[in-house]
Image (cartoon, grey):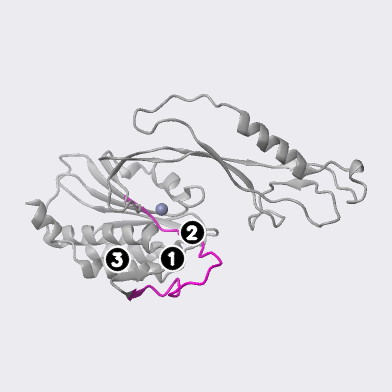
Amino acid sequence: MAKKDLLSLVKETDVVRFCQGLVRIKSVNPPGDELQAAEYVAAVLKKIGLEVELIKHSATRASVLARLKSSRKRPGLLYNGHLDTVPIGSEKWTHKPFDADLSEGKIWGRGTSDMKGGLAVLMAAAKGLAEARILLQGDLIIAATAGEEEDSLGATAVAPQPDLGPVQAIVIPEPSYNALYVAEKGAFWLEITTQGKTAHGSMPELGRNAIMMMMTLISELGKMTFPYKEHHLLGGFTHSINTIAGGMKTNVVPDQCGHCGYADRPWTGSPCYLEAGRGSYRRS
Ligand SMILES: [Zn+2]
């Protein structure tokens, strides 16, 4: 089948419908809550005729592994997209973030770009192929995964699934201005906490200031060189301090800095995160 004919199988109306359907289901991470979005993807793909498995991670979180069966003469092709989005932030939105309004030729909302739009494209492509009843030589596998914005919980659960089978390529439609990226650096997130000792702010000599300790540590990190092997496409190593929090009161010497403040752990600050790696290689 010619490339032009193949592309005509993917209907824009499906892409819009699936994207709006996904954006209207809130799956902001943290905390994730991808279950409903996963159920939506699972229901659509099942209706299309794919073999679908819902992989539950907890009462509120899940991923989907689906398959359009083939003659299995060749390894499969894996389409992967994530179900979670980043938070909506504190700025006022011109359109409500979970209404998925269609206006000025665009869908507006949290996750339309990263990456419910991409996920919608994968679903629409699978629908086009399934409806055309083309017997593929390798399975088309769709993995819609939870937790990409945090710890890749879904991908970690899906990757070792025994029925995933061999795949010859993985396509991930993350937003890339429609450019093709063929390599991606890994990321290593380091969470650092300095522990000090509280004292009254008027007698700092009696305490140990955790914020000052963190400042020293960050300054030392900036001077350090890390060993790495230069990659022919991705180049070298990068690192960046991206969040920090510390202290409890203006008149108290802080005993903690950089502590993680997620719901399942006490304290209200943010972690001090060092992110190492990250970056993509764009094929020109
Ligand atoms: Zn993304």
The answer to which of 249 and 84 lies nearer the viewer is 249
The residue that mark 1 highlights is 110
Residue beneath disc 3: 44
Instruction: Bin the neighbour count of mark 1 within 10 Å (Cα to Cα): few under 14, some 14-19, many 20 and up.
Output: many
Q: Position of residue 214 (x, y in %)?
A: 72, 40
Dot 1: element: loop
Residue 200 in magenta stretch: no
CA–CA distance between discs 3 and 1? 21 Å
Residue 159 is situated, as x and y percent measured from the top left of the image, at 39, 43
Residue 257 shown left or right of residue 234 in the figure? right
The residue positioned 28% from the left and 69% from the top of the image is 16
Using the rendered view, name the quadrant where residue 14 is placed: bottom left
Q: Earlier in the sequence, mark 2 or mark 1?
A: 2
In the structure shown, which secondary structural element does the residue marked by tag 3 occupy? helix
Residue 86 image label: 2
Q: Residue at x 41, y 71 (%)?
A: 24
The reply, left or right, for residue 26 in relation to residue 7 is right
Which mark, residue 8?
Answer: none
Can see residue 1?
Answer: no
Prevailing SS of the magenta stretch: loop
Mark 3 is surrounded, within 10 Å at the Cα level, by few (under 14), some (14 to 19) or many (20 or more) other residues, namely some
Badge 2, how many Cα within 10 Å: few under 14, some, many 20+? some
Q: What is the number of callouts on the image?
A: 3
